Amino acid sequence: MKVVFLCQRVPYPPDRGDRITTWHFLQHLLAQGNALRVGCLAEEDRDATGVSELRARGCVVEAPRIDRRLRRLASLRGLLTAEALTLPFFRVAALRARVERWLRDDPPDLIYVYSSGMAQYARAEGPWARVMHFAELDSDKWRQFAAAARSPLARWVYAREARRLLAFERAVARAFDASVVVSEVERALFVERIPGVVPHVLRNGVDVERFASRGDATREPHTAVFTGVMDYAPNVQGVLWFVQECWPALRAGFRDARLLVVGANPVAAIRALHGREGIEVTGRVPETQPYFDRACVAIAPLHLARGVQNKVLEALCMGLPVVVTAMAAQGIGTPPAGCVAIADEVDATTAAVRHWFADPPAAREAGARAAAWVREHFRWQQMYADLDRIVAAALDHRRGAAPRPAAGLSD
């Protein structure tokens, strides 16, 4: 089968949420012997290595380099054209020309689009089946930003983006052969916001062999860890909130308490935390597993969140209990009791972390149960089976056959 795969970022290395998912799905499609053409956008120098890796595995790749600051300026065109600002941000002439050439000169059997901003490259009708992998509705993220914004101008811009992007998402979902979200929570929201389309559910997976704890020898009983790209606004807001509101009380109770903030591209406000009150800010690291293995508990204090948080699943797989907001926990299902503490407010978050700091053996026992649960329910192989069913349903729909049942969560 010939596949055109479109995604925002070069899908290698798998070191952040969207890259993790796209990399694993690409590997699976390649392993089946499909011919892949990948259209994406390069944002940094190291993306050249990612493109080389994809080409070495047999992919044809078009990945024009972009400057995100210039793309933000380009996105303002949306104010003149009444479209969502997301669309001109991701609209790059070189990529559009290449995709049009692919579709014209050698039409694929399938176009697989990851993230709604890339769907504009696949609006053309043709003999191909089209799958739109929303993961989550990006429009609802902008709705959350609008609700949290303090500036009237920011509130207006975010609310406008939520409305305009939802209109685009509706058009795409109704035109494509299959839509995909990441959890049952997202499916319920999708059906509410885009009536008439019932999406498939395709969960994120975890590389359970890679995210396996090396044991308790390096565990620090009063250390918490947060992982995530540290120029992403919800991550920045969550860490700053935790440090300002919860960390002083935890340090007062545990003088050796440490907080590891692990992730690439920390903004100035995050870098300023390094070395203060037991806080370590790492920047980009080759792998996060050693930092999980130093900690007693992981935190995900995200008050703006959608979909499934890979950082939560990876922490659980590494044998850590997790303290997480309700927003950040909504897509992970039902972990074993006592492994995940859901806390949104300062007192509840502080108390949950304090509980694990005060009882490291209980933290280890809860973490062991969490790791076993992730290994049972979130192996990538289970997600690949769901992906195969979704692709088959889209191909059937395009051929005019009766659609297959929507793929739900794996048992």
Image (tube, grey):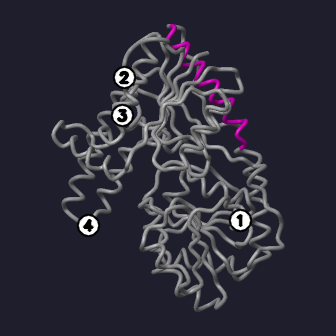
Label 1 sits on a secondary structure element that is loop
The stretch drawn in magenta includes residue 354:
no
Residue in the image at 53% along x and 85% along y: 276
Contact, mark 3 vs mark 2 (Cβ under 8 Å): no
Marks 1 and 3, the one that precedes in the sequence: 3
- Which SS type dominates the magenta stretch? helix
As measured in the structure, the alpha-carbon distance from the residue carrying label 3 to the one carrying label 2 is 12 Å
The location of residue 389, given as percent across then percent down, is: 63, 24
Q: Nearer the viewer, residue 305 or 348?
A: 305
Answer yes or no: do the residues labelled 1 and 2 have beta carbons within 8 Å? no
Q: Amino acid at mark 2?
A: Arg
Comes first in the chain, label 1 or label 2? 2
Quarter of the picture holding the N terminus: top right
- Judged from the image, the secondary structure of the residue bearing numbered disc 3 is helix
| Stretch in magenta | 379-399
> Few, some or many C-alpha atoms within 10 Å of disc 4 (few <14, some 14-19, many ≥20)?
few
Whole-Å distance between the Cαs marked 4 and 3?
27 Å
Numbered tag placed on residue 181 in the rendering? none
Disc 2 designates what residue?
A: 123
Q: Image check: 40 left or right of 174?
A: right
Cα distance, mark 1 to mark 2?
43 Å
Q: Which residue position is annotated with label 4?
A: 150
* Dot in front, 1 or 2: 2
Q: Are marks 4 and 3 in contact (CB under 8 Å)?
A: no
Quadrant of image for the C terminus: top right
Q: Is residue 24 above or below residue 58?
A: below
Res. 169 mark: 3
Amino acid type assigned to the residue bearing label 1 in the image? Leu
